[in-house]
Amino acid sequence: MLEMRNVTKTFGDFTALNDLTMTVPKGAVYGLVGPNGAGKSTAIRHLTGVYRQDSGEVLMEGQKIYENPDIKTRIGYIPDDIFFFPSASLEDMHKYYRGIYPNFDEELYQRLHEVFQLPQKGQIRRFSKGMQKQAAFHLTVSTRPDVMILDEPVDGLDPVMRRQVWSLILSDVALRETTVLISSHNLRELEDICDHVGIMDHGKMLLERSLADMQGATHKLQLVGYAPEGLDILHESNSGRLRTLIVRGSAEEISRRTAAVNPVYFDVLPLSLEEIFIYELGGVNYEVKNIVL
C-alpha cells in the first residue's frame, strides 16, 4: 500500500501540494488524474522518493520512502520524460539495472526481448520516443517491482504496443498483486484498466474512491418534463425539450424520485470517468468553450 498523509510541499511562494492525503491499496490499479498543474507529478516524485515533503508522511507499507534504499528497490518508476545515460545502449542499461535491483529477473528480461524486439546495441537516445518508452518497460518490468508508478506510460506507443503493455501490467497485477499507480490524461483508457481513481486539483485530493463507487454515486438524468425537487444537481443543460442533469445519487433513488413526478420521458445513465472528471472539477468551468475566431 502507498500512502501520502497530509503532505505539503512548497517551492518558494508556490504551494504544489496542500495537505494532500491519498491511499493506493495493495494490488490496485490506481488512476491519478487532474488538470495540468494539479500537482500529480509532484505527488509522484514524493512517492518515488525524489522529493522530500515539507510536512506530512509518504509511506509504502508503513515505511518512509524518502532516503530508504530497500523500499526504493521495490518501486518501478517510468516517468513521462524518459532518461537513460547519454551514450548507453539497451545492453548497458540492462547491466546497470541488473546490478542495482536485487529482484531483477534475467529470465523475464530475455522473454520480454521477444515482445519488444529492441536493438541491444546502439545508443538508446537514438531510438524513437516510442522505442525509448518500450525500453523503459522492458527494463522496469524485469526488476519485478512490488509497486509500479507510471507517468503517461503509453504516450508515444502505437495501438498494438499500447495493448501489449497494458496486458503485461495487468498480468503482473493478477499474478503478483503488484500495486500500480498511473497518471494519465487519457481518461478513456484509464477507465478500462483502473479499479481506483483519485482526482486532484490545486494540490489537494478532490475525490478518491473505487471506480465502481465513483460511477455509482453520480449519474446523468435525461428527461422531458419537470425534474423532482431536492435532487443534488451538479450541472444542467437543455437541447430543445430534452433536459440533461448531472445528479449525485444512486440510479435507483434518482429513478424513483423522477418517476414520482410523471415526466413525459426520462432515463438515468452512468457517467464515464471523463464526465465525472469534468463535473467534479466544476462543471461548466471545465467545459470546452466555443470561441469565434
Image (cartoon, rainbow, N blue to C red):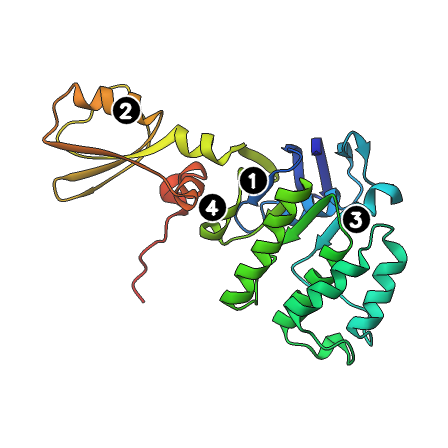
Give how far apart the Cα atoms at labels 1 and 4 are.
16 Å
Q: Amino acid at mark 2?
A: Ile
Q: Earlier in the sequence, mark 1 or mark 4?
A: 4
Q: Earlier in the sequence, mark 3 or mark 4?
A: 3
Q: Amino acid at mark 1?
A: Met
User: Would residue 103 be found to the left or right of residue 14 on screen?
Assistant: right
Mark 4 residue element: helix
Q: Nearer the viewer, mark 1 or mark 4?
A: 4
Look at mark 4 in the image and give the residue it sits on: 191
Q: Residues within 10 Å of mark 4 (few under 14, many from 20)?
A: some
Q: Name the residue rendered at 67%, 69% in the picture.
A: 114
Mark 3 residue element: loop
Residue 20 appears in which quarter of the rendering? top right
Residue 50, numbered circle: 3
Give how far apart the Cα atoms at labels 1 and 3 are.
20 Å
User: Would residue 213 be found to the left or right of residue 109 on screen?
Assistant: left
Look at mark 1 in the image and give the residue it sits on: 200
Closer to us: 245 or 264: 264
Is residue 216 in view? Answer: yes
Name the spot of residue 142 as percent of width and height, x first: 75, 57
Q: Earlier in the sequence, mark 1 or mark 3?
A: 3
Q: Residues within 10 Å of mark 2 (few under 14, many from 20)?
A: many
Q: Amino acid at mark 4?
A: Glu
Residue 241 appears in which quarter of the rendering? top left
Q: Nearer the viewer, mark 3 or mark 2?
A: 2
Kindly check if marks 3 and 4 are in contact, taking CB atoms under 8 A apart as contact: no
Look at mark 2 in the image and give the residue it sits on: 254
Q: Residues within 10 Å of mark 1 (few under 14, many from 20)?
A: many
Q: Name the residue rendered at 83%, 60% in the picture.
A: 97
Name the spot of residue 84 as percent of width and height, x first: 78, 67
User: Would residue 284 be found to the left or right of residue 80 on screen?
Assistant: left
Kindly check if marks 3 and 2 are in contact, taking CB atoms under 8 A apart as contact: no
